[in-house]
Amino acid sequence: MKTFEDLEFREHRMGGIQSVMMFDNGYGVSVIKTPHSYGGKRGQYELAVLDSSESITYNTPVTSDVLGYLSEKEVTRYMIEVQKLLTFNLK
């Protein structure tokens, strides 16, 4: 299973950092920390679940929104949940 330690962060256009990681099951995550993200000013992370086209999806058992104010450990926990989702078919 991939964890926070596996994320490769790059500079984000809004200042701060972002990492996008896709998983074998067709889902992925976008993890950001910027002055404008939920928790970014506190040094915490925001995570969004992505579909196979790398678009944010709000329709998973993991969450129906973005998740904010996360520690590195919490990011790992959600990454593992996303990796355990069943593979899905698009359209």
Image (cartoon, rainbow, N blue to C red):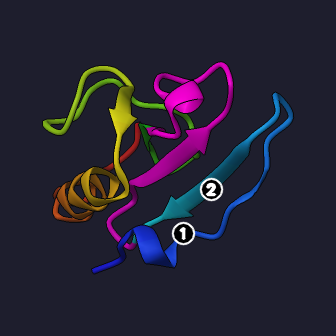
As drawn, 86 above or below 67? below
Q: Is residue 29 left or right of residue 67?
A: right
Is residue 70 shown in magenta?
Answer: no
How far apart, in angstroms, are the residues tagged by discs 1 and 2? 6 Å
Q: Is residue 72 left or right of residue 73?
A: right
Q: Secondary structure at mark 1?
A: loop
The quarter of the displayed image where residue 55 is located: top right
Question: Callout 1, which amino acid?
Answer: Leu
Q: Residue 19: which numbered mark, if any?
A: 2
x, y percent for residue 79: 31, 58
Q: Residue 68: which numbered mark, if any?
A: none
The residue that label 1 is drawn on is 7
Foreground pick, 62 / 36: 36
Q: Secondary structure at mark 2?
A: strand
Q: Which residues are magenta?
A: 24-45
x, y percent for residue 3: 35, 72
The quarter of the displayed image where residue 14 is located: top right
At label 2, counting other C-alpha atoms closer than 10 Å, the crowd grade (few under 14, some 14-19, many 20 or more) is some
Foreground pick, 20 / 55: 20
As drawn, 11 above or below 1? above
Q: Is residue 64 left or right of residue 19?
A: left
As drawn, 75 above or below 70? below
Which image quarter is the C terminus in? top left
x, y percent for residue 71: 34, 48
What's the residue at 26%, 64% (across, down)?
A: 83
Single out the residue that lies furthest toward the front. Answer: 42
What's the residue at 37%, 57% (across, down)?
A: 72
x, y percent for residue 41: 58, 26
